[in-house]
Amino acid sequence: MSILNLIMRFLLSLVLIISVTGCAGTKVSESTGEFFDDSFVTTKVKSAFLGDSRLKMLDITVTTFKGAVQLSGFVDSKAVADRAVQVARTVKGVKVVNNSLVVK
């Protein structure tokens, strides 16, 4: 009975270790918490764009990975691209803004 108990404890420990590491983030993947944090940051940046009269009608794609915001799409001028970067930087949770906006 003792050996069966030991095996069960080992298997339970193994399952717990695997499940915990499955939720952890790495350099190339996000943990569950990071995913939700990044989704929230993306939503806040898009909302900030909607609140800015120069940006609300533009089609700017916003993606976030581990707090790094990526802006992409087409804008009419460098001033508009700079404004988008400036607005994104003011959002809480944004660590860095990568500007891939293209001026038409």
Image: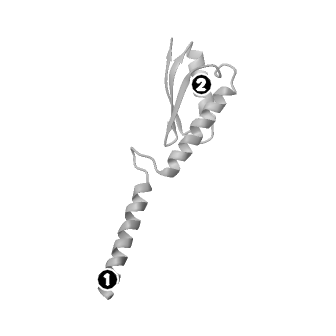
Is residue 58 toward the left or the right of residue 31 in the image? right
The residue tagged with tag 2: helix, strand or loop? helix
Q: Which sits earlier in the primary sequence, circle 1 or circle 2?
A: 1
Q: Quick one: label 2, few (<14), some, or many (20+) residues within 10 Å?
A: many
The residue tagged with tag 1: helix, strand or loop? helix
Is residue 30 toward the left or the right of residue 50 in the image? left
Q: In whole angstroms, how far apart are the C-alphas of marks 1 and 2? A: 62 Å
Is residue 82 toward the left or the right of residue 17 in the image? right
Residue, far left: 3
Which residue in the protein does label 2 denote? Answer: 84
Q: Quadrant of the N terminus?
A: bottom left
Above or below — where is 13 with respect to 64?
below
Q: Amino acid at mark 1?
A: Leu
Q: Nearer the viewer, residue 77 or 33?
A: 33
Q: Nearer the viewer, residue 7 or 43?
A: 7
Q: Amino acid at mark 2?
A: Ala
